[in-house]
């Protein structure tokens, strides 16, 4: 494997481990809020967890510069495994046999997906990225995604505390946009660092990081709401599955980063998704 691919994998693993630790700390602040009545956001630990999540996402962002979204996204399984262990050890949440089986399936699914995915997306210029965005399939995908986000946001105030998937699907659909922007911005940055300063003349170079930052902040908001309503051991595995499906779909449709999807790869991904039902 190319050294760049390995760097991307290692950055994704480190980033997701940090995210798992941050989510555990955040859930701890929500538990304290229920016990004391003091808002979680008033605790320094809450903001430390936010900084940790941002740091983890920065690691994931850097990983997109070296590896394909179809490689980086499934490595969110690292966060699932770490969170499951931390939820049991730190938060005293029950770790059942089915949870352990789900973790094993997730590891298997993620490893097989990574091995069957293309190591990295092809390089593209600003103009080529714009053409990808303007493709009919991309426009249709983005319209459906926008409608989904609007619909979920409308029902979130009344149903968000009852149904886990409301907030998590908001995170995941927005996350797919963050992944697309991260992949594009990493390519633009690489071009700039290689001496191609013409990228600075295109408005899209400035729009992409703005959209990336806005969607990332909104993800944190909705993920925080989900953590406040549901157990960490339920939120993180389900978020892993929904986020992986949404981000890989976005990369496949918009960036045309389609998997070399063998029967083995399909089996692996289905096995990883089985965690959602355990």
Image: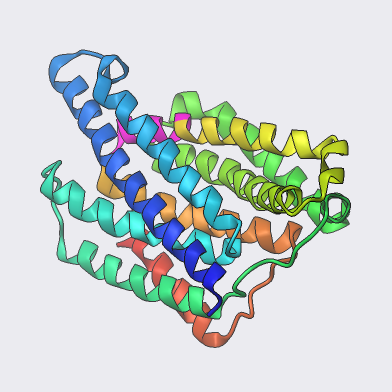
Q: Is residue 161 visible?
A: no
Q: Looking at the image, is 79 positioned above or below residue 263?
A: above
Residue drawn at the location 82% of the way across and 50% of the way down: 196
How are the colours assigned in the image?
rainbow
Residue 206, quarter of the rendered image: top right
Q: Looking at the image, is 54 positioned above or below residue 131?
A: above
**Is residue 224 one of those drawn in magenta?**
yes
Q: In the image, residue 103 lies at what x, y percent?
A: 28, 66
Q: Is residue 53 visible?
A: yes
> Please, which residue is most extreme toward the front here?
195
Foreground pick, 110 / 207: 207
Q: In the image, residue 220 lies at what x, y percent?
A: 46, 33
Q: Looking at the image, is 204 positioned above or below residue 71?
A: above
Q: In the image, residue 12 lies at what x, y percent?
A: 45, 57
Foreground pick, 105 / 77: 77
Residue drawn at the location 28% of the way across and 14% of the way down: 42
**263 relative to 16 in the view: left or right:** right
**Is residue 234 one of those drawn in magenta?**
no
Residue drawn at the location 44% of the way across and 36% of the way down: 54
* Chain part drawn in magenta: 221-231
Residue drawn at the location 42% of the way across and 65% of the way down: 273
**29 relative to 242 in the view: left or right:** left
């Amino acid at each position: 494997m190319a050294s760049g691919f390995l760097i991307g994998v290692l950055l994704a693993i480190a980033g997701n481990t940090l995210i798992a630790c941050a989510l555990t700390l955040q859930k701890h602040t929500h538990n304290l809020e229920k016990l004391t009545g003091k808002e979680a956001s008033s605790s320094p630990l809450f903001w430390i967890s936010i900084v940790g999540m941002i740091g983890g996402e920065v690691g994931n962002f850097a990983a997109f510069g070296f590896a394909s979204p179809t490689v980086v996204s499934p490595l969110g399984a690292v966060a699932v495994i770490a969170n499951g262990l931390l939820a049991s050890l730190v938060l005293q949440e029950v770790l059942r046999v089915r949870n352990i089986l789900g973790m094993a399936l997730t590891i298997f699914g993620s490893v097989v997906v990574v091995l069957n995915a293309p190591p990295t997306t092809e390089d593209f210029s600003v103009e080529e990225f714009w053409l990808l965005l303007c493709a009919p399939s991309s426009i249709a995908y983005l319209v459906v995604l926008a409608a989904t986000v609007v619909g979920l946001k409308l029902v979130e105030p009344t149903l968000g505390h009852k149904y886990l998937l409301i907030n998590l699907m908001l995170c995941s659909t927005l996350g797919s946009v963050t992944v697309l922007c991260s992949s594009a911005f990493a390519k633009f940055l690489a071009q700039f660092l290689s001496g191609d300063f013409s990228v600075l003349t295109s408005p899209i170079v400035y729009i992409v990081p703005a959209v990336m930052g806005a969607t990332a902040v909104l993800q944190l908001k909705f993920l925080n709401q989900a953590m406040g309503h549901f157990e960490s051991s339920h939120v993180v595995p389900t978020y892993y599955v929904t986020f992986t499906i949404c981000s890989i779909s976005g990369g496949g449709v918009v960036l045309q980063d389609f998997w070399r999807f063998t029967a083995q790869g399909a089996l692996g991904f289905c096995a990883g998704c089985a965690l959602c039902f355990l």
